[in-house]
Image (cartoon, coloured by chain):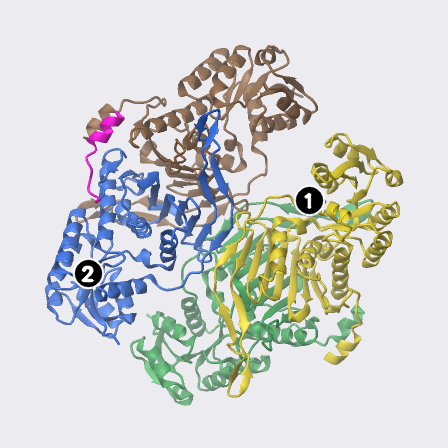
Chain colours: A yellow, B green, C blue, D brown
Amino acid sequence: MIAKLRIAVIGAGYWGPNLARNFDASPDWDLVAVCDRDRERAQLVADRHGGVRVVTALNELLAADDIDAVAIATPAATHHEIACAALAAGKHVMVEKPLADTAERGEDMVRTAAAAGLILMADHTYCYTPAVLKMRELVREGALGDILFIDSVRINLGLVQPDVDVFWDLAPHDLSIIDFLLPGGLRPTGVAAQGADPLGAGKACIGYLTIPLANEAIAHVHVNWLSPTKIRRMVIGGTTRTLVWDDLNPQQRLSVYDRGVDLTQQSVDGIDRAASMVSYRLGDTWSPALSEREALAVMAEEFAASIREQRPARTDGEAGLRVLAVLEAASRSLANEGKLSLLTENGAPALDVGRTAVVL
Amino acid sequence: MIAKLRIAVIGAGYWGPNLARNFDASPDWDLVAVCDRDRERAQLVADRHGGVRVVTALNELLAADDIDAVAIATPAATHHEIACAALAAGKHVMVEKPLADTAERGEDMVRTAAAAGLILMADHTYCYTPAVLKMRELVREGALGDILFIDSVRINLGLVQPDVDVFWDLAPHDLSIIDFLLPGGLRPTGVAAQGADPLGAGKACIGYLTIPLANEAIAHVHVNWLSPTKIRRMVIGGTTRTLVWDDLNPQQRLSVYDRGVDLTQQSVDGIDRAASMVSYRLGDTWSPALSEREALAVMAEEFAASIREQRPARTDGEAGLRVLAVLEAASRSLANEGKLSLLTENGAPALDVGRTAVVL
Amino acid sequence: MIAKLRIAVIGAGYWGPNLARNFDASPDWDLVAVCDRDRERAQLVADRHGGVRVVTALNELLAADDIDAVAIATPAATHHEIACAALAAGKHVMVEKPLADTAERGEDMVRTAAAAGLILMADHTYCYTPAVLKMRELVREGALGDILFIDSVRINLGLVQPDVDVFWDLAPHDLSIIDFLLPGGLRPTGVAAQGADPLGAGKACIGYLTIPLANEAIAHVHVNWLSPTKIRRMVIGGTTRTLVWDDLNPQQRLSVYDRGVDLTQQSVDGIDRAASMVSYRLGDTWSPALSEREALAVMAEEFAASIREQRPARTDGEAGLRVLAVLEAASRSLANEGKLSLLTENGAPALDVGRTAVVL
Amino acid sequence: MIAKLRIAVIGAGYWGPNLARNFDASPDWDLVAVCDRDRERAQLVADRHGGVRVVTALNELLAADDIDAVAIATPAATHHEIACAALAAGKHVMVEKPLADTAERGEDMVRTAAAAGLILMADHTYCYTPAVLKMRELVREGALGDILFIDSVRINLGLVQPDVDVFWDLAPHDLSIIDFLLPGGLRPTGVAAQGADPLGAGKACIGYLTIPLANEAIAHVHVNWLSPTKIRRMVIGGTTRTLVWDDLNPQQRLSVYDRGVDLTQQSVDGIDRAASMVSYRLGDTWSPALSEREALAVMAEEFAASIREQRPARTDGEAGLRVLAVLEAASRSLANEGKLSLLTENGAPALDVGRTAVVL
């Protein structure tokens, strides 16, 4: 039998207690400490888990010998500092989404972890739900054929956040899922963003992201804090099948439509015409059975496995970085009236000059 | 009792027979002729309606004394020529959507009709469905409060058209409906468009339109020929209520959510903060009963009423023009990497220079 | 090429025009006459089909040489007389449901047709819908395993009929479908019926049928004229799969749940216990693609095929009889406070005495 | 401020922990002890609630001075003995459903509580859900008009129980809800039951209950352990409105259809005919907003209120008795081939002889 890994949870606010509960329940982990500046808050969480140690000072926590890894659930602006300190202390690190508040700081975290030979994992929780795991399996085994489009809608009444707009609040979910599904991850050629602030909240409360992908495919994300109707749906259209994920329909979360579109070049009067040349195949619909496992439990297992097998987690720091690159590009596009903000293969901003010149 | 108006239908292809059937059944109209270059096709339609007259030459048709109005259901590229000839012959004109193939030609049609004192009506059929008529009533009586956003999705497997992209094929539906709903019609400050052609069809098969409205509200339209799942849904979010139209749910096409969002300015430490300042009201949902009346029958009635009352039809030529202006702006944005294409109050392209300068 | 068969439709009320339209459009049939005592009504139907012959006297119609078959769409009380006269005149006969107003008269019709070597077909239209045809295929190929239960709900606001109660009005649909699905047809051991007449209409407006089947399986039918919510759903539970037909969900009419129940005998403390001995298998859900063909067109084809191949139609007179036997048993049960009315294998009433004695 | 009442939970199996959690969280109650023969099981529950007292002997528990009331969550066969002992010790009593295993024992409990002047409450949990509370409000304020029918479906894959059939396992939910809704409670004139055991489990796994109500209305309950499709829906049809409760649709649990049916006596040829005499009103649909409060929390509040105000709980012992009377009548009907088992106003079995004679 393998010895359990030992973990401390940093941050006892909204998300930390969920992490604590799942690491405590995991066969892979021993929860050994809860760390928060607010001792009372930390104690409440610790009490629910057999009275594990409570620590209020980060450096005290990181100095401890009996901790292999930390899970960070503090505000995004503090991720970089805490994660780098933990890595410097030789701890593996898992960070709540988003990985950091800027891509630059995220890159520094990834570099630091790599240099130290430690695991840096992004807590992209949705990726570990049974539905998304099955979607990844289907996309990657080619069940959909080539991806033509991904359309994601995540709208609901939501609190206007003090520090972030609706893109930075909600889109990380959609982007991390799309990154998880696509072989090679989400590496768009650009990002266009449109936002609206009809209530005068001082930031976008409604947002649309358009993300050109390789091979002329396209992804699109609609996030919205102002909709009383709750919709969480992603449609992934492929050449052979189309998949619909309706997260609010527990009776049938995933539907796979065995219907494909194909382009048949037809020569009409000696001219290749694209008219009426799409052929359709109308087939059955199929809804795979899904397990009921909690996503955070699967994530805890993956974190342990990546440490033991010394391999990147399925949602590693790089995945977190790719999400950040898209969010930053979205902010740039938003400031430029929605014009496409180009990205390099590595997710860095591309110079727009050349291409724009061509268009002109 | 009022004498019936007399109408001829021009074009006996896909849509013309529907027009003929509804004008024939209308208490306001006598269907007196069907006109098509293809005599056999016209005869087939005429036979279904008591053998009304068949005409193959437009000028012969327009020379007839016993025709008060014509309904044009020919390809968009021919609308301008036929409509202007009919107006010149003193006939009232109804034109299938889109009004014309360019805004310039559409404007000429509107001017010609105005000069002749004749009715020019756009056949925006969807506007006359019981659902949309009820939506207009609700929006215009203020049941939703101020409009915050309109989000329209119209996706389905559809034939790639030879002459138009997915914007020009499908978006006229959404745009004419939005125009019909908003008091004053659809007069956006700009349009941004993103498209994709993942099958290599030579034109956009997937399209997204973002349309900033007055008061920082926003409209967004998603049209897509490549989706095996059929979705036709419009969400209209207001400050006091939100309306959802799900056209594929005959049991409950319209849902009105009595839930509002409101912004409460809160002073925190002397600073106005937009954080947690949105207050929600969670109320009931309400689904109004709708009549089962056919849209084209209502449209035929409206055409007759506008002629008799000498007032613009509810979907007049101007409405058709506003739709054209958005479609043309979308094409310009598409050619400029999705950057917002600005529009004047009248729907004409605005010079982008000034505003861009301000942004810079 | 095979010569077309020639048919006359008798009865030009509600259903007759649908029959006329489908026989007229069928490649197997020539519609040659429409017969109704009300000449004007018949003429209206005839005019829609190229002015076929109108006849007002039945004997005149049946005397015609150019008619191979008749389709009867008159009130149930007249079916026996008209059908027997047609059979006597050498015509094949199709009869709208129910086959007759009593089982006795239905039996006479079946005997007469058999003696004359002519086809007698029951117009169980629902059986020829794409959904029910697929259900029959699935049940008969064993896809569901052994049938455990069939639960059918058909409720809606409906007109209270002058001559029949809700059982005789609506249940023929459910019963004919169940008969069509089960290999060997619907041959229950008994029928129990409960009804209610809360409006004081003088007959049951709400009805429940319980129908014990072979092997302890059970069928149950809920028919209701007083429900503003429309439900048309049949659940067929089998040992290996369960099928749900939701006729009002055009996007997914059929769902096949790959979930079975099985009984595992467990010996607990030397005693066979039925507790916790049902094992479940939770599998995928599957929704087969269905064609869009109109049921009456398929039925017209089947009528022609049965005549040409000299074999019983898939919904032959015997099927009609089995439905009548259940309806009559239901009426008996209703008069006996819902007590099970026993049936013999042939659908005749069984003597209840013996079994009741055992219970006492 | 009012002093809290003090409660002990008896039975730490499946349901007891939920009771303990809710009484512990209630502002009305102090949870002071958990009692179970299995000390370990009781301790686990006690630990989750600040280490309240653990007791394994019932008489020790009942002898304690610091306990005002007990909540009993033990098997049904033990309810009578434990409840009577608790009442004898002067404690108020809440009992998990069903109240007892026989109506006779239930009656004894009700008499004993009345004699002692103590509260006896049935834990009909579903009655305290926001949906059912709203339904009661609507029914009782007359929003539906006169009740015409109640149709309840509760089907799902469920474990075959060792001691009870599907009627005794599931129908108490439906019956207690119907009892809660109807003014005066569920007082049917009779009960008819049909069951099936297609797996050979030794007891009914599929069951149908038909329950004639006053004024020719009818209630019907379908319970089923063998259906992989989960349905929990109740339709309540009234003369002015119809209510549908779909408990598995969290987005719209309740729908109120503003559609009524009415009987208009029409004199046709001097005869009152019930034909085409039902008039319909098609109105809007309305879905009331529901709170998210947990049912057990509301129930704990009601238990406290009934004790303090010295009035019967809304689900008192009498309500529990009425449910038992129907279940026992169902068992009698089941043994008599589904024949209606008559009940007196008080829920006692009525002699069937007279009425049957009338029918004969």
Q: In this rendering, would C54 be left or right of B310?
A: left
Q: B66 left or right of C63? A: right
Label 1 is placed on what type of residue? Answer: Leu
Residue occupied by mark 2: C119
The quadrant of the image that shows the N terminus of chain C is bottom left
Which residue is at a point 68% across and 69% down the rendered structure image?
A214
Q: Nearer the viewer, residue C292 or B17?
A: C292
Query: Which mark is on residue A296?
Result: 1
Left or right, C268 with respect to B240, comes to left
Give the residue at x 66% y 46%.
A295
From the top left corner, tell me how far across and down residue B173 is, in percent: 53, 68
Residue B314 seen in the current view: no
| Mark seen at residue D89 | none
- Where D56 falls versus D199 (above or below)? above
- Give the magenta range: C346-360
Across and down, in percent, residue A85 comes to: 87, 47
SS type, badge 2: loop
Placement of the C terminus of chain C among the 4 image quadrants: top left
Residue A312 pos. (x, y %): 76, 53
